[in-house]
């Protein structure tokens, strides 16, 4: 199970397709690096950002649990600001087959890493319309 946090901002690249992007929609490299830095400030180590065909991700271990944090964005075509858009941060706790079969270590809305990411986003000026899916 994963939890998605969505918000809007114009602070990250949603307009310039970089040469190293797998697909033209692979935005999120700069947001992934920024979030990794914010988590590191809180003592949470995550991997260097890496790319998928839909966006970027970071991963790491926090309090004995493995996490995957996916990042993707969509530009707001109606905006005059080229980087205005909605970002989605997907937080997923990786569980073993045994944990899945036994229903143990499930992720919940109160998960500490999820709450930390939410707090980082809430505290940031220029981010709006933060909500969960």
Image: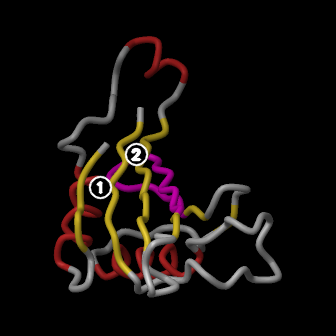
Residue for point 46% across, 70% down? 76
The magenta stretch spans residue 123: no
Q: What residue is at 68 percent from the left and 65 percent from the top?
A: 25
Q: Give yes or no for contact between labels 1 and 2 (Cβ–Cβ under 8 Å).
A: yes
Q: Earlier in the sequence, mark 1 or mark 2?
A: 2
Residue 20 quadrant: bottom right
Q: Which residue is mark 1?
A: 113
88 displayed left or right of 127: right
Q: Quadrant of residue 14?
A: bottom right
Q: Nearer the viewer, mark 1 or mark 2?
A: 1
- At 48% across and 77% down in the image, what residue appears? 31
> Could you say where residue 43 lies in the image, as x and y percent from the top left?
31, 74
Q: Quadrant of the N terminus?
A: top left
Q: Nearer the viewer, residue 123 or 127?
A: 127
Question: Which numbered disc covers residue 65?
Answer: 2
The crowding category of the residue bearing disc 1, from other C-alpha atoms within 10 Å (few below 14, some 14 to 19, many at least 20), is many
Which residues are drawn in magenta?
58-72
In the image, residue 65 lies in the stretch drawn in magenta: yes
Q: Is residue 43 left or right of residue 97?
A: left
Local crowd size for mark 2, using a 10 Å CA cut-off: few (<14), some (14–19), many (≥20): few
Residue 70 vs residue 62: left or right? right
């Amino acid at each position: 199970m994963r939890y998605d946090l969505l918000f809007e901002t114009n602070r990250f690249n949603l307009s310039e397709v970089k040469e190293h992007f797998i697909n033209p929609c692979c935005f999120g490299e700069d947001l992934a690096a920024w979030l990794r830095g914010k988590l590191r400030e809180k003592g949470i180590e995550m991997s260097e950002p890496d790319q998928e065909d839909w966006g970027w991700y970071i991963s790491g271990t926090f309090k004995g649990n493995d996490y995957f944090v996916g990042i993707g964005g969509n530009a707001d075509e109606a905006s005059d600001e080229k980087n205005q858009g909605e970002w989605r941060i997907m937080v997923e706790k990786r569980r073993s087959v045994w944990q899945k079969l036994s229903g143990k270590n499930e992720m919940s809305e109160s998960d500490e890493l999820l709450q930390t990411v939410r707090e980082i986003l809430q505290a940031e000026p220029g981010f709006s319309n933060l909500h969960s899916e």
